[in-house]
Image (cartoon, rainbow, N blue to C red):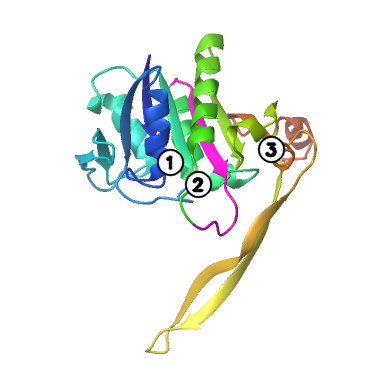
Amino acid sequence: MHLLVTNDDGVTAPGLLVLAEELRKSYQVTILAPDRNWSASGHVKTMHRPLRVKEVLLNNGSIALASDGAPSDCVVLAMLGLIPDDIDLVVSGINPNANLGYDVTYSGTVTAAMEAAIWGIPGVAVSLDSPENHLGDLDYGPAAKVARKVVDKVIENQLHSKTVLNVNVPYLVDGEIKGYQITRQGLRVYRDRLDRRFDPRGRPYYWIGGDAPTGIPEEGTDFGALENGYVSITPLQLDLTAIDMLGSLQGWDWN
């Protein structure tokens, strides 16, 4: 079983290396990831410039491939034959922060896994709910073990190829994680603020800032699972059709 590992934090991000090392205990793994950080990039496809790929030596002495494209570009490159062996599953992560609720539309981590679904293979996105303003190195070990268990189950149960699993892991040691919950997307609360400033020539420029987003930890949601110490596994699909609105819209007078 051949896995493609990618991320949106860049090929040298520590979470990617820990993830790849854990998955290599059971599977063939190839790393193809962006050469820089693409956090909050969303679902990007580069079509107006060439893409370049180079080999990179990682901290453990292994070789990875780095592209100057987005996370989803990395998946496309692999699918189109840059990697000669067929890819059976894409695993994206480990992101250092959770991707919950509406975050999935912004997240390069999640949309890399979504790109896999477009190409007809399952995708798994893995994120760690690390503490805000954490000092020092993050411990990705428990999240990597969670990722391998999820991958094992995906392969064992033959997850539908058009499905993405968005996995969020609480920042706890192995013995403190209470288990796994299958969840729906929760409600993310954003507190964005526009900060208008002036450069030395008096011209305005803008930062989109504000306080860190929060969420409503309802039972059955990704927020609720993390709040209670569980791994959240949310199945996602690419079909965004609001099915419950079809009948209502058809009832409007379009003439």
Q: Does residue 187 appear to the left or right of 46 in the view shown?
A: right
How many C-alpha atoms fall within 10 Å of the one at disc 1: few (<14), some, or many (≥20)? many
Quote the CA–CA distance across marks 3 and 2: 16 Å
Q: Disc 3 on helix, strand or loop?
A: helix
Q: Quadrant of the N terminus?
A: top left
Compared to 126, does 26 lie above or below? above
Which residue is identified by label 1? 15
Does 128 appear in magenta? yes
Which residue is identified by label 2? 96
The disc label shown at residue 45, or none: none
Stretch of the chain drawn in magenta: 120-135
Compared to 73, does 179 lie above or below? above
Residue 69, image x and y in percent?
31, 45
- State whether residue 7 appears in this view: no
Q: Are marks 2 and 1 in contact (CB under 8 Å)?
A: yes
Q: Are marks 3 and 1 in contact (CB under 8 Å)?
A: no
Q: Amino acid at mark 3?
A: Asp
Q: Nearer the viewer, residue 194 or 57?
A: 57
Quote the CA–CA distance across marks 3 and 1: 21 Å
Nearest to N terminus: mark 3 or mark 2? 2
Q: Amino acid at mark 2?
A: Pro
